[in-house]
Each structure stands twice: as structure tokens, then as C-alpha cells.
Image: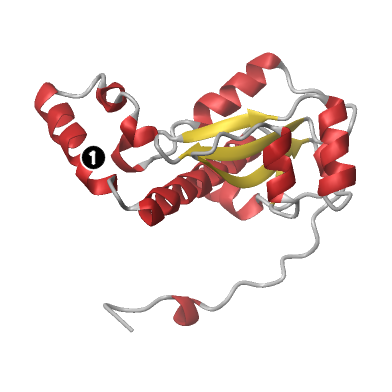
């Protein structure tokens, strides 16, 4: 599938074939494609929580997920989180294959860029989550699967269920599988002249 086709055809699908299973090879392909998403300083601070346990998924759906069927019926349910302190944790590993002078320069910049700027650490984590989510959904579309991004769940309670570390941030979930119903008609995109600004406001 062409990238443009994947972008235009990707929709938030709400109904999935609960009997369909992705193969281990497909799941690996999807995740390996997802981690090609860019991150600032190549930190790669996203952490993908695969919600595989059927009982856990059912609990999230019933108790904390507004009874959204895709939470239990999709072939794969991925909760996106990110480590806001990844910039402190062996930063040289993010440039293992870079030229030495490039690696040293970026590692030396990383600390001063993040230090004492908790708002930036959180913003960067959420930005990276968003890019990775879109990468995953487009990759799924190209593999013949459908997806649905979801934020309609109790973030605090789900964080407790997965034992989210204190220095991590929660993002949305993405459900992936074989859709059984078409999405609603597209509600409509704003005109370009409403969203594109030349050189400043």
C-alpha cells in the first residue's frame, strides 16, 4: 500500500473480529516498524505496554474503559507510555552507531537541554508517543489491519493496574485488528486556509 493511501484510508474502527489473532511474526513486524518513529535526541523513550491478558483487558473495558468493545475484541491492544527520564539513562546507547564526534556532541547537549525542564520532558514524551502512535496505525493499515486510537479510559486507574513507574507518562491506547464494520463517514476536514499560516499569525 502506498503511504498516501494508508493515510487517507486509516480510520478509527470501533468493531473488531474478536476471534482473529495476529501471528507473532506480524506483531513483531508491526512493533519493529513502529520503533522507526523519530524522537528528539533519538531517545526512543516510548514504552509499549502490550495488554495481552484477557482478564486485564476485560477489567479495563468494564471498570475503567467506558465499555469500549475494541479493548477486548481487537487482536492487539497497546498502551503507549514514555519514560520522561530516559535522557538520564545511559544516553550514549542512543548513538551507538553514530560517528564518535556526533555521538559525543549530542550526548553532551542532552543533559543541559532537559535538566530542570520537567515541562519539556513531559512534552517531549507525549510528542514522541503521538508520532509513534501514528506510525503504528499507518503500519497496521499497510499490513491490512485496522486500528483505533483511544483516550477514553481512566488514566490514573489503568496506570495503577500496570504499575506505571513514577517517572513515566501515560499516553493513549491503540487497538489493532480485523475490523468488522466500516467507520462512520468522515466528519469533514477544515479547509487549508483555516489551518495553514504563512510566516506568522
**For residue 88, side relative to residue 122 (left or right):** left
Instruction: Answer few, some or many: residues within 10 Å of disc 1's Cα (few below 14, many 20 plus, some between 14 and 19).
Output: few
The vertical placement of 76 against 138, above or below, is above
SS class of the residue under badge 1? Answer: helix
Q: Quadrant of the C terminus?
A: bottom left
Q: Position of residue 153 (x, y in %)?
A: 75, 51
Looking at the rendering, which quadrant does residue 74 occupy? top right
Q: Is residue 149 visible?
A: no
Instruction: From the viewer's side, name the closer residue of 116 and 133.
Output: 116
Residue beneath the point at 40% across and 37% down: 85
Residue placed under numbered mark 1 in the picture: 111
Residue beneath the point at 44% across and 50% down: 122
Residue beneath the point at 33% across and 35% down: 87
Q: How is the structure coloured here?
A: secondary structure
**For residue 19, side relative to residue 163 (left or right):** right
Residue beneath the point at 65% across and 31% down: 163
**For residue 134, side relative to residue 79 (left or right):** left
Q: Position of residue 174 (x, y in %)?
A: 68, 42
Q: Is residue 190 visible?
A: yes
The vertical placement of 50 against 112, above or below, is above
Amino acid at each position: 500500500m502506498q503511504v498516501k493511501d494508508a493515510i487517507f484510508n486509516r480510520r478509527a474502527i470501533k468493531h473488531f473480529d474478536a476471534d482473529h489473532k495476529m501471528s507473532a511474526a506480524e506483531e513483531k513486524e508491526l512493533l519493529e516498524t513502529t520503533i522507526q518513529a523519530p524522537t528528539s535526541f533519538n531517545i526512543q523513550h516510548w514504552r509499549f505496554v502490550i495488554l495481552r491478558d484477557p482478564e486485564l483487558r476485560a477489567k479495563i473495558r468494564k471498570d475503567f474503559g467506558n465499555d469500549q468493545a475494541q479493548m477486548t475484541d481487537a487482536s492487539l491492544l497497546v498502551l503507549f507510555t514514555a519514560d520522561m527520564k530516559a535522557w538520564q539513562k545511559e544516553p550514549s546507547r542512543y548513538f551507538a552507531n553514530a560517528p564518535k564526534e556526533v555521538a559525543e556532541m549530542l550526548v553532551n547537549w542532552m543533559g543541559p537541554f532537559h535538566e530542570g525542564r520537567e515541562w519539556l520532558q513531559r512534552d517531549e514524551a507525549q510528542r514522541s508517543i503521538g508520532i509513534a502512535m501514528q506510525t503504528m496505525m499507518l503500519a497496521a493499515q499497510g499490513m491490512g489491519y485496522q486500528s483505533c486510537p483511544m483516550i477514553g479510559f481512566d488514566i490514573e486507574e489503568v496506570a495503577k493496574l500496570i504499575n506505571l513507574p513514577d517517572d513515566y507518562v501515560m499516553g493513549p491506547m491503540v487497538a489493532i485488528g480485523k475490523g468488522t464494520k466500516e467507520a462512520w463517514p468522515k466528519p469533514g476536514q477544515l479547509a487549508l486556509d483555516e489551518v495553514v499560516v504563512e510566516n506568522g499569525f
